[in-house]
Amino acid sequence: MVAVTPVLDAPRELAPAGRRRVRVWRGLALGLAAVYFLLPLATSFWFTVHNERQGFSLAPYPRILAAEGFGTSMLLSLGLAAATIVVALGLTLPAMLAVRLGAPRLRPVLEVVCTLPLVVPPITFVSGIGTVLRSGPDLLATTPFWGTLMAIQDERFPLVLVLAYVVLALPFVYRSLDAGLRAIDVRTLVEAARGLGASWPYVLLRVLVPNLRSAITGAAFLTLALVLGEYTVAALLGYRTFPVWIVTVAGSEGQLSVAVSLLSLLIIWLLSLALSGAGAGRRRSS
Amino acid sequence: MTAGVEFRGLRRMFGRTVALDGLDLTVRPGELMALLGPSGCGKTTALRCVAGFEHPDEGAVVVDGEDVTRRPANRRDTGMVFQSYSLFPNLNVRDNVAFGLRVRKVPAARRHARAAELLELVGLPTHGERYPHELSGGQQQRVALARALAPEPRVLLLDEPLSALDAKVRLTLREEIRRLQLDLGITTVFVTHDQEEALSVADRVAVMREGRLEQCAPPAEVYDRPATPFVAEFVGTMNHLPGRLSSGEVTVLGMTLPVEGPLPATPEVDVLARPEAVLLTPDPDGEGLVVTSSFRGSSARLRVRLGDLEVLSDVPGHDTVRLAPGTRVGVGLVRRPVLVAGRAGES
Ligand SMILES: Nc1ncnc2c1ncn2[C@@H]1O[C@H](COP(=O)(O)OP(=O)(O)O)[C@@H](O)[C@H]1O
Ligand SMILES: [Mg+2]
């Protein structure tokens, strides 16, 4: 998550001994967490740079950039992530606002619908998509929906994947936006702005979006991480996204594939920093 | 800039709840009208119909002679101050105040000048760079007022703007709202459930009940000559004294008084009397007994036991000595036409 949980201060009235005990426990928990997260990363890194014959060498890293398919698959995944973020936010935010302002009683329905993808196992989801794609032409061939879908198909940019990822991202986007919407009084802000003469697009873009910036950033980041890490759907549908590429490479070159995984982690981390930077900034206006 | 507002037979249902039940009311240009009534009587709904946030099922809202019932909220030219804090959290105070001008594409220099002018007017000239979360509740409502006034709306709508504030701020701010309203001469509808607030700031008070208008009159008239028992009950304090109707007159506390207002069907009635209309005379054989006395400077409110009845009476402050608690008193009423209601508070 992008949001940083505030560290709770130790209760002030504790005696010094008690405070020390709290500090010890806190250190222990932190240490355990660090070991849990960092140890695998460290050993992975060690694996990429150490080898029986040559000893220490950073050689696999430059090789990544030269490796066949790295650039295209990375770009594909980033493009998919961007499209997914736009579509998921573009669907979810207006829907959630409409429900809040116009039909509060539909809120649980929207919540259930948006959370549903979380309880469907990925493999079920993929085989579902497979079935639809296989039997779709027979059943849907004459509908405008299918026609449109076919018309906008593109070998280099698989829209099917975007649609699938939007569904997978819905629960995260929903949760993130829901938290943001709970923190502000949507109705009053909207009415205040409308009363002062703002049109609906103005209200959305200049009043609500700025006040939901961190929620939107959070949603975007979760979606990005999801798309850059999703293997099952892409592989089964036969597209070579970044994770699929990593797995292909892993078959032939062990060290290289682990190095790529580490690198992709770094990239995601940097992107998320950039995103939250964009979310935190922009305090100034007019 | 200043315009009259008319509510013409407004009806609004929420499911089976009738929020407005044919509300008719005319607010004159430049007037401060208080909409007063118990919680849930439809005050907010009526106000939101003027702002365009709510749409009546029947009836019309007319501003300055124009029917605006179907006009969207952003083209109604009304300024609204909400009950809850409503400043845009991402904008500083100056940009909040200038919001309506920014929407109207007023150039930056002019809207900043206007924002500064309004912040001066509401007594916050140095707070322009602050953010809403850095302000107290009272300051936030002042900024909200400045923001509503900045685009020079035709009508100012206030929905219980003071109810979230503590008592002291509430008093000063309501005085200031009134001063500002008089200075600008802006037509204002002020919604409140606090009768004292309504009586102290308004030119006229419209008392509402269950979505309808009960009475609309200047404060003194609403207080002294309430049109219905409901108004009498809601505005100020009322004693209920058992009385008996006969041929248009009522017998109460051994006196016979003329009756005004509607007559209940049964002869057994409650006579409604203000504490200042209850007269006490020290009398060792009197039926009343002064129980408590709370001194308020120029006057004092006495609680008098009369059989199994408790009666409140306001007396001049200097009378508290001869009417100290424990004194036996005779109880009477000022000789004036009285309002009566069906027995036991059903009205
Ligand atoms: N959006 C709404 N949905 C359902 N009922 C509502 C809504 N707004 C108001 N009501 C109902 O309409 C009645 C009048 O409400 P309101 O105008 O807010 O009263 P007031 O402001 O005088 O307290 C109340 O019974 C309230 O519960
Ligand atoms: Mg209300």
Image: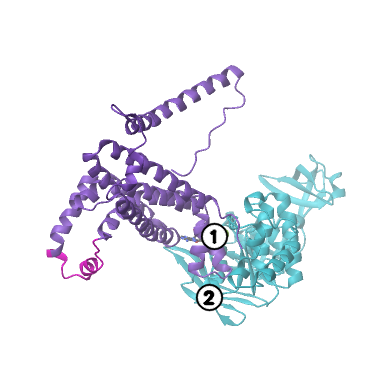
Q: Provide the secondary structure element on which disc 1 rests.
A: helix
- Disc 2 sits on a residue from what chain? B
Three-letter code, disc 1: Leu
> Which residue is found at the position 32% from the left and 47% from the top?
A66
Establish whether ligand 1 lies closer than 8 Å to the Cβ of label 1: no
Tint applied to chain A in the drawing = purple
Q: Position of residue A180 (x, y in %)?
A: 47, 51
Q: Do callouts 2 and 1 mark residues in contact (Cβ within 8 Å)?
A: no
Kindly indicate the quadrant of the structure image that contains residue A163: bottom left
Q: Is residue A142 magenta?
A: yes
Q: Position of residue A102 (x, y in %)?
A: 43, 62
Distance from disc 2 to disc 1, alpha carbons, whole Å, reads 29 Å
User: Seen in the image, is A268 located left or right of residue B224?
Assistant: left
Pointer 1 residue: A189
Label for residue B320? Answer: none
Image quarter in which the C terminus of chain B is found: bottom right
User: Seen in the image, is A75 located left or right of residue B226?
Assistant: left
> Which residue is found at the position 69% from the left and 53% from the top?
B138
Tell me the chief SS of the magenta region.
helix
Q: Is residue A114 above or below residue B110?
A: above
Three-letter code, disc 2: Gly
Depth check: give the residue in front, A240 or A53: A53
The magenta segment is A138-155
Depth check: give the residue in front, B340 or B70: B70
Pointer 2 residue: B9
Q: Is residue B106 magenta?
A: no
Chain the render paints cyan: B
> Which residue is found at the position 59% from the left and 65% from the top?
B208
Q: Is residue B265 above or below residue A219?
A: below
